Amino acid sequence: MKEFLENVRGLMPLVHNITNYVTVNDVANVLLACGGSPIMSDEPEDVEDITSICGGLNINIGTLHKTSIDGMVRAGKRANALSHPVLLDPVGAGASVFRTNTALKLMEELKLTVIRGNISEIKTLYLGSGTTKGVDADIADAVTEENLEESIVFVKSFAKKEGCIIAVTGAIDLVTDGDRCYVIRNGRPEMGKITGTGCQLSGMMTAYLTANPEHPLDAAAAAVCVMGLAGETAWKRMEDGDGNATYRNRIIDAIYNMTGEDLEKGAVYEVR
Amino acid sequence: MKEFLENVRGLMPLVHNITNYVTVNDVANVLLACGGSPIMSDEPEDVEDITSICGGLNINIGTLHKTSIDGMVRAGKRANALSHPVLLDPVGAGASVFRTNTALKLMEELKLTVIRGNISEIKTLYLGSGTTKGVDADIADAVTEENLEESIVFVKSFAKKEGCIIAVTGAIDLVTDGDRCYVIRNGRPEMGKITGTGCQLSGMMTAYLTANPEHPLDAAAAAVCVMGLAGETAWKRMEDGDGNATYRNRIIDAIYNMTGEDLEKGAVYEVR
Amino acid sequence: MKEFLENVRGLMPLVHNITNYVTVNDVANVLLACGGSPIMSDEPEDVEDITSICGGLNINIGTLHKTSIDGMVRAGKRANALSHPVLLDPVGAGASVFRTNTALKLMEELKLTVIRGNISEIKTLYLGSGTTKGVDADIADAVTEENLEESIVFVKSFAKKEGCIIAVTGAIDLVTDGDRCYVIRNGRPEMGKITGTGCQLSGMMTAYLTANPEHPLDAAAAAVCVMGLAGETAWKRMEDGDGNATYRNRIIDAIYNMTGEDLEKGAVYEVR
């Protein structure tokens, strides 16, 4: 996986992010940490120019505003025209009709490279409706060792139907293009106590897609491994009295310091 | 106070936040640190669905936009209909006519469980007008040992008039339902050098209200003690060269690690 | 330079920020760290009241929205009427027509005290058009020891033409009023791996301008030295495994702890 990481550091891809205001600062710092370069813009009049100077586009519907949807569509169409990778992070799909419908609209109007979300969000998009417990995956719906087989079948069939990569993150992560499916077991449960690790991953994954255009599936999987491995590395540096704020910083620090060798050694995955 | 903290950790209340973009990330991480779960949404078309899946609503008017006011009212009415606790943090009331009038409008249109602000903001709402020195309390107007008696009389009468809990935070914190008044002496002055400790407290307090529906006054006071005690615990971990950025992280870490026992031992308050 | 820092600590200037949602939290914490006090507001109906209770105005066009432009103009005109310093940070000027034109419009409609940006942004404004590689300076266009002479001539002539102070930050920083030019060599290249150090500097610089109204050029230069020196001090505290997230916190901490003596000893500059 090492080359995917090294390509990001070498090419420093500029990523256009239309993302929520909760986690945006961490997304920017994670993009810098992994070797990319972030730019944020959601104003419809601004997004086409911004996307044009970037290499990839990350669309995240957390704290979605009606006025931003037009920006998402315009930026996405421009990115499609330029053959830039486009990632959709459907934060909270299933939590409201507005978010679900917006995600479905974006899937319809844009050619997406990756949809990355938790299992509830992905199931919502598959079904075209549904509910989630807020922005976090319904535990009953988590991918587990017990339901792994059927989960893989599900994500593969969704990826095939949509013609894009589906990345489901949780305790076990699945990344598939419909044909091959990466099953990734990096990460720690305490990462769920930090806001926005999913958003951060989406930003970083867009940088990986941008710097590795020939291998989108493997690049997306590599980004998932980097995030999870950073969570493990960061955890080792935690001291007595440290909590989720320090853990957040240490994870970004771990991404900043991770080498291709580290990733090669630490990534825990199989391909099915 | 221990049970109020433990109920939050046990019930993991989902809190809907309509809050400012300055401190929103910290609000989310504090909610996770205390055992709750945050979701942010201010788009009028989105808020009713989001509030419906949550247990409580936190409305904060810092960086207020005209378009968000409708979202605040809609979310608040839905929360009222569902008997969810609703907290108003009137950031900057008194600093502008727009903010003052919006806070007054929300007080009129919604049934609020708690109004939490600094003394200048609370006085502004009491008077229906006035000015503050920005978002921080006018020092001349602070609650002190000297003016404690009259301050308690003031907040009690305001709470009675409004029919809701009033929480005034500063060097000495007052939390009252018009009948009993908690006088809390936790915290450190250096907390004022971190942006958004008030916003963080409002988010956390909403989680406490949500997880302790039978005891809103005590739960609100417990949240104030948690914040102040976390400020004390965090301060003990400060090292030479550390400043407000590290202090911010250590406070969130301290909330993350605080147990019911810690709170029981560390809370400094009397009830008048 | 010591008096400029001490005036900020003594006068605690309240700074109105109309700034982007990516770096706004850090801007607020840096303002508190240096001794100022931040308030954020971009709603057109709110900004005039807010500016009126402040001492200075910081306008930053990152994540610009069409609706905010009116707020920027209204706040700027009120600040001009009150003789408050007004700083413009033209984030991404050159990256899109929308940003470039907005920056030019603000320059035309407002009396600016300082324009602070990277060399690409400043060149764009000088030319009235152009492109940049996102929000970071084009390396080919950096101020270097080799092109220092001509760079100074350029910024001096632009400052004279605009009748305001121009501050170009990068590896070498230039701050000029058209007559004298500070050439500043504090800072570290790793600061470029943190999002928003430029935005943070703009916020802090506005506090310096506000607290030192008789010496805007020297105060602006002092703020640049503080930021760079904080980057150096913070770097010395970095430990094995630390990365850009920790570095971000340590820089804010260093600003928090910096004394006038520290600045006097650590500032590396010449005046040409």
Image (cartoon, coloured by chain):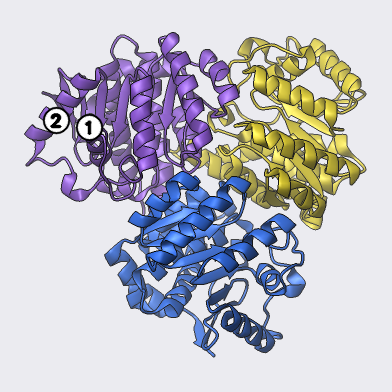
Chain colours: A blue, B yellow, C purple
- How far across and how far down the image is residue B14, in percent? 76, 52
Q: Is mark 1 on a helix, strand or loop?
A: helix
Question: Residue B247 appears at what percent x and percent y?
Answer: 53, 39
Looking at the image, residue A179 lies above or below residue C44: below
Q: Is residue A180 above or below residue B5?
A: below
Give, as a three-letter code, the residue at label 2: Phe
Q: At 42% from the left edge and 62% from the top edge, which residue is drawn?
A: A79
The numbered dot on residue C154 is 2
Residue shown at the point (52%, 55%) measured from the top left: A72
Label 1, residues with CA under 10 Å away: few <14, some 14-19, many ≥20: some
The residue drawn where x is 62% and y is 40% is B233
| Chain letter of disc 1 in the image | C
Which chain's residue wears label 2?
A: C
Residue drawn at x 34%, y 69% is A211
Say whether residue B27 is visible: yes
Q: How far apart are marks 1 and 2 (CA)?
A: 9 Å
- Work out whether mark 1 precedes mark 2 in sequence or the reverse, and give the earlier one: 1
Compared with residue C101, is residue C160 higher up or lower down, i.e. above or below? above
Q: Nearer the viewer, mark 1 or mark 2?
A: 1
Q: State the image coordinates of residue B155 (x, y, percent, origin top left).
A: 82, 18
Give C257 or C85, whichever is nearer the viewer: C85
Q: Quadrant of the N terminus of chain C?
A: top left
Report if the CB atoms under discs 1 and 2 are less than 8 Å apart.
yes
Q: Which residue type carries mark 1?
A: Tyr
Using the image, tell me which numbered label, if any, was put on residue C126.
Answer: 1
Q: Viewed as shown, does residue C264 lie left or right of B165?
A: left
Name the image quarter holding the C terminus of chain C: top left
